[in-house]
């Protein structure tokens, strides 16, 4: 007796989903993220799938809608960042040293990875609590705190004169042992 095939078998659709995701995003990493997000949504909504429906069309529809949602979020993020940049440029002109320093900090801020910049912006500039910022980003509070910590560390490295993206190194204290 052969087992009855499960009506919600998506394994056979993975190649199609990956191709479509690559077509939508034009980036292999973004495509994999999109496939993952779409499959999570499909799994969460599998009860809404009709037994007589076309699973391929259903999954592609979910993927398309997920992609559109991601584009909207990115557009919103870009508009928010541009608005923040415009406000930053409207400050009163400072003395030359301060002006150069503000420009360096602003450039370093905008070079942070998106996730770190978003978290830091919500907590520092928008003055949201960690809980509010985590909810706004849809992430656990621990993840938010980690992103903020990494962003601050990266910005501090600018203060220490370290190259961009370099982390602090341990310093040897006490010499080589031959100094006694």
Image: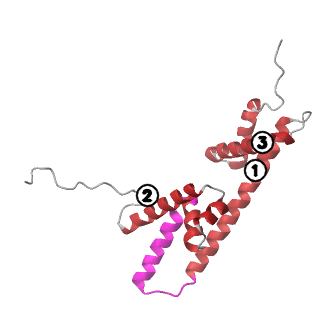
Q: Position of residue 43 (x, y in %)?
A: 76, 40
**Dots 1 and 3: beta carbons under 8 Å?**
no
Neighbours of disc 1 within 10 Å: few (<14), some (14-19), many (20+): some
Instruction: Report the side of 136 relative to 95 (left or right).
Output: right
Q: Which residue is mark 2?
A: 165
In front: label 2 or label 3: 3
Magenta-highlighted stretch: main secondary structure? Answer: helix
- Residue segment shown in magenta: 90-115
In front: label 1 or label 3: 3
Question: How far apart, in angstroms, are the residues tagged by discs 2 and 3?
Answer: 37 Å
**Element assignment for label 1:** helix
Q: Which residue is mark 3?
A: 42
Instruction: Report the side of 91 relative to 56 (left or right).
Output: left
Pointer 1 or 2: first along the chain:
1
In which quadrant of the rendered image does the N terminus lie? Answer: top right
Taking the spot 12% from the left edge, 50% from the top edge, the residue there is 177
Question: How far apart, in angstroms, are the residues tagged by discs 1 and 2?
Answer: 32 Å
Residue 156 versus residue 81: which sits nearer the camera? 156
**Element assignment for label 2:** loop
Residue 129 versus residue 149: which sits nearer the camera? 129
Residue 52 located within the stretch drawn in magenta: no
| Residue 22 appearing in the image | no
Neighbours of disc 2 within 10 Å: few (<14), some (14-19), many (20+): some
Q: Which residue is mark 1?
A: 66
**Dots 1 and 2: beta carbons under 8 Å?**
no
Residue 103 versus residue 176: which sits nearer the camera? 176
Taking the spot 55% from the left edge, 55% from the top edge, the residue there is 142
């Amino acid at each position: 007796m052969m087992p009855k095939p499960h009506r919600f078998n998506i394994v056979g659709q993975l190649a199609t989903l990956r191709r479509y995701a690559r077509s939508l995003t034009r980036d292999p990493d973004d495509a994999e993220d999109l496939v993952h997000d779409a499959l999570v949504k499909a799994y969460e909504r599998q009860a809404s799938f009709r037994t007589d429906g076309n699973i391929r069309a259903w999954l592609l529809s979910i993927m398309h809608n997920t992609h559109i949602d991601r584009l909207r979020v990115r557009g919103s993020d870009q508009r928010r960042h541009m608005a923040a940049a415009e406000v930053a440029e409207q400050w009163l002109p400072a003395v030359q040293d301060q002006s150069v320093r503000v420009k360096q900090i602003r450039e370093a801020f905008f070079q942070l990875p998106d996730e770190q910049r978003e978290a830091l912006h919500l907590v520092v500039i928008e003055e949201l609590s960690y809980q509010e910022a985590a909810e706004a980003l849809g992430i656990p509070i621990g993840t938010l705190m980690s992103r903020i910590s990494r962003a601050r560390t990266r910005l501090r490295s600018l203060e220490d004169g370290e190259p961009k993206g370099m982390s602090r190194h341990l310093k040897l204290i006490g010499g080589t042992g031959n100094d006694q």
